[in-house]
Amino acid sequence: MTDDVSRNERIKEASHYLRGTLAEGLGDEITGAIVEGDQQLVKFHGMYLQDDRDLRPERTRKKMEKAFAFMIRVRVPGGVLSAQQWLALDEVARTYANGTMRLTTRQTVQLHGIIKSNLKATMRAIDAALLNSIAACGDVNRNVMCNVNPEQSSAHAAALDLARAISDHLTPRTPAYREIWLDGERIAGGEDEVVEPIYGKTYLPRKFKIVVAVPPSNDVDVFAHDLGFIAILGDSGEVAGWNVTAGGGMGMSHGEPDTYPRTADLLGFCATEDAVAIAEAVVTVQRDWGDRKNRKHARLKYTIEDRGLDYFCAEVVRRAGVLLEPARPFTFTATGDRYGWSEGSGGRAHLTLFVQNGRLADRAGAAQLSTLRAIAQIADAELRITPNQNLMVANIPADRQTEIHWIAKEAGLLAPWSGLRRNAVACVALPTCGLALAESERYLPALLDALDERLAAHGLSADDIVIRMTGCPNGCARPYLAEIGLVGKGPGRYNLYLGAAFDGARLNKLFAEDLDHEAIVAALDPIFAAYAAGREKGERFGDFTIRAGFVAATGSGRDFHANVRARAAAPPPQ
Ligand code: HEM
Ligand code: SF4
């Protein structure tokens, strides 16, 4: 390996297939943390070392170590869990984590606040439920997402089959995971092609994200991901094959215009039997061509920008050994979830619940975590985490439906009336995320209260408008594909982005910078008023903000930073 690669590359290479000194570090009782190199490696095992940032000032004053704890992200391909698996995670959340479960925008469950001495017991409990967390974070293929589909069950089954097949194929093979967490036998490392036939010693240059979509729903946000498969349905609703997309990604850094979010390109159409080979080929091209010197330029989106789409595509086809046909027509209508009841087969039905920002806890007045435990116990149903941090209870038998409806309603889990809140997503941010510059999950509900009041004044309460917030520009809640995107800039301050497409196909554009709460409301209120007064029939809020000249349309990732007319917010009304 040459000298000019990034530090992370050296850590990976020296790690002996993700072992590092993790096993030793776990036994060190002097600190609640682990050493720097292992902090990078532990991500590949599905966890982040974090500390409670609320407690930092007090602990610094008292000269105490930071309040370290781990976040574990479980791998849940397609977001589908059995009732038993849900109950096992619920138990882990209560016993070892902070008593909450966090449903994520990539259809996984995050458990926060697990101290080092409880890690192994937690991992064993997860393993006993036939789940794992390998590659849930790190420079590897992450959780494969899949459309949560209450209405087209055969297409959902095909999409889930594909998501699981890709997930299995691209899961790291290193024995380090079992060895470290589950006390497996140490197996000597062999040659690259034996231990990690797809990844090799240094895995990928950066994270890699794959999704499977079923039109007309774009709930998985296919254009936000490195690789996507869009189901093309035949006349009788069965899947005829897949359009392939590549090169989407969200992350960027403030003040660095060489970094930008990008929507994926369409590569072509493939048959179901070729999809895994295409996925592997895209991954290996990125493994070999991706930038290993500069992590801010290491995602597939930059590889495609630098090499050109045609050149990239030709290499994928060559490696996969299959031809891609021209992409076939498809139509997406929305990225949101279809809340409420929908009919399944054999008298069963599905219920999509609303979970504010994906956080399930037992709070005064709404014991949502316990309610879901009760639902999982009663229904013996399947639970599907949606890409919008919500939860669908699938295949509920007829004789349980009324009971489940009422207990879900009681716990505040049915969809709210506000069209903005129904389409709102926030990343975790403070207090756990070390990268957060501003609040997100803890603040968005209050902002929605204020915005809902303005929307009501303009008669827009029931209109579906997509709003997403993150505490930093990394983009975990996909804010650059929201009609209203808010990205943390510093404590209590956000950049405001407008103009994304409701179907997830067009990025938004910076509208105003560094806004505090009052300034966000003051900036949006006149735009809501203009929308209420001047929209055309069926015109979406994001499209309107472009037509009315509030922002220019973003054509592709490269021009995300172009034609910005950002300004300070309008002064608050006198
Ligand atoms: C450079 C880019 C990124 C970095 C360094 C990063 C890092 C992190 C960290 C540290 C967390 C843990 C926060 C916590 O739970 O306390 C997190 C959460 C998460 N990230 Fe990222 N992230 C990045 C970009 C993205 C992108 C682009 C996506 C999705 C398209 C994403 C998806 C998620 C999800 C789903 C969560 C879980 C919480 C949620 O639902 O918001 N991340 N990320
Ligand atoms: S967007 Fe930033 S603040 Fe939010 S979870 Fe991701 S890394 Fe943390």
Image (tube, grey):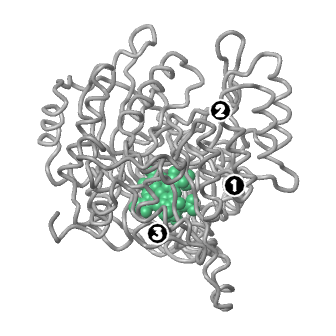
User: Could you tell me how far apart the alpha carbons at marks 1 and 2 are, in whole angstroms?
Assistant: 30 Å
Q: Residue at x 33, y 24 (%)?
A: 242
Please tell me which of labels 1 and 2 falls first in the chain. Answer: 2
- Mark 3, residue position: 512
Which image quarter: residue 86? top right
Residue 476 in view of the camera: no
Determine which quarter of the picture holds residue 469: bottom right
Within 10 Å of the Cα at label 1, are there few (<14), some (14-19), or many (20+) other Cα atoms? some
In the displayed structure, does residue 180 sit left or right of residue 296? Answer: right
- Identify the residue at image location x=41%, y=61%: 41
Crowding around mark 3 (Cα neighbors within 10 Å: few <14, some 14 to 19, many 20+) is many
The disc, 1 or 3, on the residue closer to the chain's N-terminal end is: 1
Q: Is mark 1 within 8 Å of ligand 1?
A: no
Q: Could you tell which of marks 2 and 3 lies nearer the N-terminus?
A: 2
Q: Secondary structure at mark 3?
A: strand
Residue where numbered disc 2 is placed: 383
Going by the numbered disc 2, the residue's amino acid type is: Leu
**Where residue 44 appears, x then y in whole percent?**
43, 54
- Which quadrant of the rendered structure holds the C terminus? bottom right
**Between 67 and 29, the one nearer to me in the picture:** 29
Looking at the figure, which quarter contains the N terminus? bottom left
Residue 320 coordinates in the image, percent (x, y): 19, 30
Tell me if residue 481 comes above or below residue 215 in the rendering: below
Mark drawn on residue 452: 1
How far separated are the C-alphas under marks 1 and 3? Answer: 20 Å
Image height of 325 relative to 44, above or below: above
**Whether label 2 touches label 3, CB < 8 Å:** no
User: The residue under label 1 is which amino acid type?
Assistant: Asp
